[in-house]
Amino acid sequence: MSPRENVLKLSFLSSVIAAVVCAPSARAATIAYDDFAYSAGSSPVGQNGGQGFSGAWYQGGFNVGQSAGTVTSGPLTYPPLATTGNEVTIPTSSLLNGIERDLASSISSGTIYVSCLLRPEGTIGQGNGDGFFGVYLHGNQNELFFGNSGAYGTGGCYAVEQRGGYYSVPSSNVPVLGQTEFLVLKAQLSSSDTFTLYADPVPGAAEPSTGVVEQNVNIGTLSSLVIYSGGAFDIGELRVGTTYADVTPIPEPSTLVLLGIGAVSMMAYAWRRRRS
């Protein structure tokens, strides 16, 4: 085979790699997403980035006394989950701390998924409600919380429950200081809601066959998400989607494509130099 034929062959191979790896993935549209890509040192309150929301973050949530939180540079990471933007650091508080944001469209039926990254800071178990922290779905009938329950005075465990600690169903995962936790909540909304919590599932893999299940809470119509806490923690990558894949994405393959094409091109160039 001539040098020119080898170069053409390698060039063709690089094109095939690009076409295969760049093929679009089959995913439904994301309902809402915020990667907190706001200026470091600012408060998330009043920020209006991301997508799928009707307005900015504001102080909100049941009986909250403050909305403390600071945007910290750099995202939380949980490989291979795709992460961008920044994180929000929320301190320990003797008051209930709440930051709320309304969805662009309320949801009363069907299946949705909500995911986020959480990392405990400070002293686990310290703060209002034994240092609980997480996110709750605000409905017109009830609220469904997932995160660190804080129910046992030592940080509790990651659980799904009615907001306030009722009907708590714990996972086997306990908060570890400085360790990022990936939580995915499956919400099947109907006349009798079912919520399934997956603690630390593998991003990019198939939906787990089992999780911890809560069937005692009906939230009615979901209208907003609330970051709710008494303990210190960081939060990042808040997503809402209609499929499991929507909220557990892995990085787009563009970087891999560039590396692959570069490697093949270099091989072609070296081959041609050796044969010339």
Image (spheres, rainbow, N blue to C red):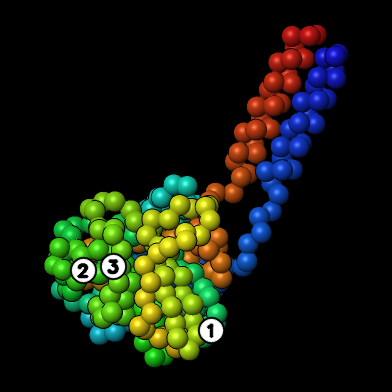
C-alpha separation, residue under disc 2 versus residue under disc 1 = 30 Å
Q: Earlier in the sequence, mark 3 or mark 2?
A: 2
Q: Is residue 127 visible?
A: no
Q: Viewed as shown, does residue 204 lie left or right of 230?
A: right
Image location (x, y in percent) of residue 26? 66, 59
Q: Is residue 162 above or below residue 230?
A: below
- What is the C-alpha distance between the residues marked 3 and 2? 11 Å
Q: Position of residue 244 (x, y in %)?
A: 53, 63
Q: Which mark is residue 150?
A: 2
Q: Is residue 81 visible?
A: yes
Residue drawn at x 25%, y 58% is 174
Could you tell me residue 183's position as x and y percent?
39, 62
Task: Please state which of the two labelled residues, at mark 3 or mark 1, is closer to the viewer.
Answer: 3
Q: Residues within 10 Å of mark 3 (few under 14, many from 20)?
A: many
Q: Nearer the viewer, residue 96 or 222?
A: 222
Residue 119 shown left or right of residue 263 in the figure = left
Asked if residue 103 is positioned above or below residue 82 in the image, the reply reads below
- Residue 29 location, quadrant: bottom right
The structure residue drawn at horizontal position 77% and vertical position 15%, both measured from the top left corner, is 272
Q: Nearer the viewer, residue 83 or 21?
A: 21
Residue 170: mark in rendering: 3
For the C terminus, the quadrant is top right
- Badge 2 local density, few (<14 within 10 Å), some, or many (20+)? many
Residue located at (54% from left, 69% from top)? 241
Graded by Cα atoms within 10 Å as few (under 14), some (14 to 19) or many (20 or more), the crowding at tag 1 reads some
Instruction: Kindly identify which residue carries mark 1.
Output: 109
